[in-house]
Image (cartoon, rainbow, N blue to C red):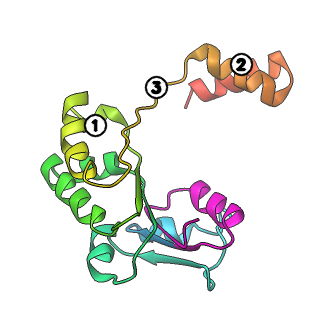
Amino acid sequence: QPRHIAMIGMGGGSLLKFCHRHLPWARLTVVENNPAVVALRHTFAIPDDDARLSVLTNCGAAWVQQTADPVDVLLVDGFDELALRVSYERAVEHFSTLTQAAQGEAKIVITSRTQHFYSDQQMKSALGEQASSQRGYRLVRLQRFTHEQIQSFLEKRLGDKEKAARRLELLSEV
């Protein structure tokens, strides 16, 4: 049962809201580098800061270097987006800094789209070599959903085949 969960990147806040709702014993620290994203927190129904939740506007790597507060779980969202803004090598250095926040039994979860890596081997070597030193290291690669899987999900969710087809058509336009 994690006592302190740190999230690097807030995005729309889905993961934050899930943790806030379902892990009431955990303290949550969210570090988002884009002040515009933080300013939209109420649009996405992200709770206000309180004794359990703190949303900070800062660079994730800088926060890791500055904090003396150990974390049990470090969630790094958008490693791939970082790689688009800076060189790939700099992104790997950033990742190395982030892993320093997770010591001992801490768990690290990183999300990244694979198309930002030149190959699976590059992804495994860049992230895996550093992360593999963490106890319980696992590398999981999720595959894209097929059109049929999405259609089936929408049919179950919406309870109607035609509504599902219309929703899928809308999604395909995005």
Part of the protein shown in magenta: 1-28
**Residue underneath mark 1:** 116
Q: Quadrant of the N terminus?
A: bottom right
- The percent position of residue 14, horizontal first and vertical second, equals 61, 55
- The percent position of residue 85, horizontal first and vertical second, equals 25, 52
Dot 3 or dot 1: first in sequence order is: 1
Residue positioned most to the top: 148
Separation (CA) of disc 1 from disc 2? 29 Å
Q: Is residue 149 left or right of residue 73?
A: right
Q: Quadrant of residue 71?
A: bottom left
Separation (CA) of disc 3 from disc 1? 15 Å
Residue 11 sits inside the magenta stretch? yes
Q: Quadrant of the C terminus?
A: top right
Residue 79 sits inside the magenta stretch? no
Dot 1 or dot 2: first in sequence order is: 1
Residue occupying the point 65% across, 27% down: 170
Instruction: Find residue 152 and name its label.
Output: 2
- The percent position of residue 107, horizontal first and vertical second, equals 42, 58
Looking at numbered disc 2 in the image, what kind of residue is underneath it?
Ser
Looking at numbered disc 1 in the image, what kind of residue is underneath it?
His
Separation (CA) of disc 3 from disc 2? 17 Å
Front position in the image: 29 or 105: 105
Q: How many marks?
A: 3
Q: Residues within 10 Å of mark 1 (few under 14, many from 20)?
A: some
Instruction: Find residue 143 and name its label.
Output: 3
Q: Secondary structure at mark 2?
A: helix
Number of the front mark, 3 or 1: 3
